[in-house]
Amino acid sequence: MSAGYAAVGWNRQKKIYDWIIFGFCVLYLLTFVVLTAFFNPDYTFETVLIRSTSTLAVLLLHIILSIGPLARLNKKFLPLLYNRRHLGVTMFCIAAVHGVFSIMQFHTLGNVNPLVSLFTSNTNFNSIAAFPFQALGFFALIILFLMAITSHDFWLHNLSPKIWKTLHMFVYLAYFLIVMHVMLGVIQYETHPVFVILISLGAVWLIALHLIAGTKEVKKDNQKFNPGTEGFVYVSEANEFEEGRAKIFCIDRERIAVYKHDNKLYAIHNVCKHQGGPLGEGKILDGCITCPWHGYQYLPHNGQSPPPFKEKVSTYDVKVSEGKVFLNPNPYDEGTERPGASIN
Amino acid sequence: MSKSEFYIGWMANAPGTFAKHAKRVLLILFPVALIVAYLLATSQKKFSSANFEYGKLTELTGIYFNKPVPLLKVYDKNREPITIPLVGYGKHGAETAIMEIENERKTSLNGKEVTLKGTLLYGDGKTILQIDKNDKPLVNIGSGSAFSVVERDLGTQTIRGEIVDPKCYFGVMKPGEGKVHRDCAIRCILGGIPPVLHVQNKIGESNYYLIVGPGGEKMNEAVQDVVGEPVSIEAKVMQQDDWIILYTDKESIKRISYAQLRNPGAKVIACSSMK
């Protein structure tokens, strides 16, 4: 969290994270290239480059798409989530090597522009078996490119979190395009079943992981609350709160985080303004509610980030009566100060 | 995990249990990378042993013919012909380079003994010569030759195989066939490289057929939609020295299934017998 913009806000963890990504990529590429050269001495450099980068990019994409739901299921995966954008940009760069080199290999030095060639060589768009699979990879690469160049808080703030998040949800479309690119391309060429088995296992893993994590969220969101008086609903017993931590309640489809701080309860909107992280799963540090995803902070009594930061979230009324906690789900304007409710 | 532990990425160190968990995840991910790389690298189809002598120029002397495709007939010491189809630089046929030579010399090369300089591609008993105007491919031009082409009419046949571009197939690219190479093969053929039908029998023996129109005209654009796919071609089959030519038309080229390709049937030409 910073007030200005830097290309990368380096810290020790980020450096370790990037060195691990680098080591992972080098290990994979070296293994693939050396084994190909050993088992296939007639290999060509161009083909090995195209294949090693494509398979590495697909592997990285599976890891990237797994991190979100894994972090929802187990907070210990948060260190992988924090710098996930570095992994995403790395994956794009590797996919770009595959894409650019493939276009050069298959479409340059011809009688038309390489990009024209990409869409006019194979025109069997009405056939599944003969479908021009390279176009699918091209569009996936465009999506990954847009995601990579906007993988910075500058774009998050300037596009607005909603638009930014929507843009980055297109990663699932990119994933689908890539799966189809593989299924209609290399799977139709290679005869060994390991290719179709691995891509299928990857898809099953990701679908199962997202369903499990999603089901957990839905269960939380479907919790029923009895309507109370004056707009307040009973949500919990006061003694169930832990100092510096929150409980999340989903009322009328809005998630509200109720924090206990200095023996008082404060309610704020659960969604972090940065990337939509669950503020209720965070912790109060230095008097600030701290988002578990990227450490963005908000003051509990007004939902405002401490100066010089400008993020603000909605606040809510909360009251405690006879040891029972009641919450009014009608939000105040973002950053509105509320007194909180004393537990004693 | 201790309840007091809380991870924030901008802190210098991750709490103990988070750091331990991250290490355990890495202990899984790195072996996964090795296993995936091993499985994929060792499961690839064998690369072709064809060769492209990139950067090496070779001079060949023979008789140039512009039909059925631009080619050079080189004769071995037993005066047996070796037919070497010509291709141009990149994804282009040889016509432009030949035409420029002919315009420059103000004479037709057809039927004349010439010495050409170019880059050889070869594999599976076939040889191709790439000529590039930047290499000044014409070394010498002689007079007309007394050598004649031996032709044998093999009748009308139905042949099943895959249409490839011979430049990539015989060495420039690996693979130079199949779905993954399809776009490139189309671009090469549309650029003037003559289409070739590759036929393979059940024991992996291959044969190759140059494809031209009924009157010997180019079929490059006519085959665009079926390049790199299993096809059945009904054609008048002519053997010209060591190459076989298919005289066919667009309507006689039909897309078939891979199952049909693998089980050609009795009426389909047996590639091994044509060698």
Image: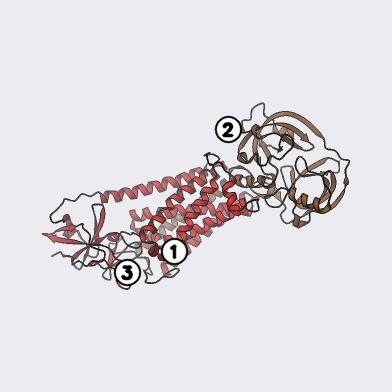
Chain colours: A red, B brown
Name the side, left or right, on which A39 lies relative to B24.
right
Q: Residue at x 82, y 35 (%)?
A: B150
When the figure is inspected, residue A262 is found, relative to residue B29, above or below; the finding is: below
| Residue holding disc 2 | B259
* In this view, the mark in front (1 or 2): 2
- How busy is the neighbourhood of tag 3: few (under 14 within 10 Å), some, or many (20 plus)? few
Q: Pointer 1: what residue?
A: A17
Which is more toward the observer, A283 or B241? B241
Cβ–Cβ below 8 Å for labels 2 and 3?
A: no
Three-letter amino acid code at disc 3? Lys
On the question of residue A103 being in view, the answer is: yes
Image coordinates for residue A291, horizontal then vertical, percent: 31, 63
Q: Mark 3 falls within which chain?
A: A
x, y percent for residue A93: 51, 59
Are tags 1 and 3 found on a single chain?
yes
Gap between marks 2 and 3 measured at Cα: 65 Å
Residue at mark 2: chain: B
Q: Give the image location of residue A259, x and y in percent.
A: 23, 63
Which residue is situated farthest in the left direction here? A322
Indicate which disc residue A310 carries. 3
Q: Is the residue marked by circle 1 packed among few (<14), some (14-19), or many (20+) residues within 10 Å?
A: some
Please state which amino acid type lies under the numbered disc 2.
Ala
Point 21% across, 58% down: residue: A330
Relative to B170, residue A269 above or below: below
Tag 1: amino acid: Tyr
Query: Quadrant of residue B70 in the image?
Result: top right
Q: What residue do we see at 78% from left, 36% from top?
A: B240
Q: Look at the numbered disc 2 and give the secondary structure of its residue.
A: helix
